[in-house]
Amino acid sequence: MGRRLVPLTLDNLQDLPKRCRSCVFWELDPVSGEAAVKAGTPALEKEAWISAVLLDWGSCGRVVYVDEVPVGFVIYAPPAYVPRSTAFPTSPVSADAVQLMTAFIMQGYQGQGLGRVMVQTVAKDLLRRGFKAIEAFGDARWKEPACVLPADHLTAVGFKTVRPHPTYPRLRLELRTTLSWKEDVELALDRLLGAVQKEPALRPL
């Protein structure tokens, strides 16, 4: 099985699941996001966001390929580039952290260690760039695939709650701990990423 992780760019954006290519839940604030959906331009807004972040900050995601087939992705960025994050009751994300926005692994490719490899790749990238942690908003009442990852799955892979909330706690993963993960965490990672195996639909704003 040949697998590779490639930085997300405008050239391989089409390799994301269709709905994810036009989802701007994180990339726009609630008002702008609703306007983009009504105008039918979320895909263009997604491209514009990725382009701007690449030019200004650099790599903001990874696409995972197995035998040249795209099977998953992860998107992350400093909170300054994630307008939606300010709408959460447990914001802001810490100044020394990058926000894990969303992640995905296709059903049928879970349980192969791809989740572990993906998160470690992100961790190494961010450590080189001087960041200390990844933070994410979790959904404590998660019931179905969506743009916000389930909080219990985040804690299962090592995230710690830094600001509790009954619905949207903010969690943190120290990057250096990811470099020494053992295989017993691998299954939990796959559960986390497999939890969004379906294409996340745009949530009502």
Image (tube, rainbow, N blue to C red):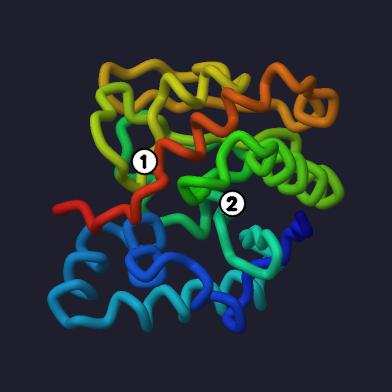
Q: Residue at x 50, y 26 (%)?
A: 154
Q: Is residue 165 above or below residue 60?
A: above
Badge number at residue 78:
2
Location of residue 142 in the rendering, given as x and y in whole percent from the top left corner = 28, 29
Q: Closer to the observer: label 1 or label 2?
A: 1
Residue 90 against residue 33 in the figure, above or below? above
- What's the residue type where badge 1 is placed? Val
Residue occupying the point 63% across, 62% down = 63
Residues at marks 1 and 2, CA–CA distance in whole angstroms: 16 Å
Q: Residue at x 51, y 46 (%)?
A: 108
Q: Amino acid at mark 2?
A: Pro
Q: What residue is rendered at 41% in x and 62% in y? A: 27
In the figure, residue 163 lies in which quadrant?
A: top left
Q: Give x and y (percent) for residue 88.
A: 32, 38
Q: Is residue 125 above or below residue 55?
A: above
Q: Earlier in the sequence, mark 1 or mark 2?
A: 2
Crowd rating for badge 2 (residues with CA inside 10 Å; few <14, some 14–19, many 20+): many
Q: Nearer the viewer, residue 191 or 52?
A: 191
The residue indicated by pointer 1 is 148
Q: Secondary structure at mark 2?
A: loop
Percent x, y of residue 128: 86, 49
Q: Secondary structure at mark 1?
A: loop
- The answer to which quarter of the image holds residue 4 is bottom right
Horizontal side of 161 relative to 84 (left or right) equals right
> Which quadrant holds the N terminus?
bottom right
Q: Is residue 102 visible?
A: no
Residue 125 in view, yes or no: yes
Closer to the camera, 63 or 155? 63
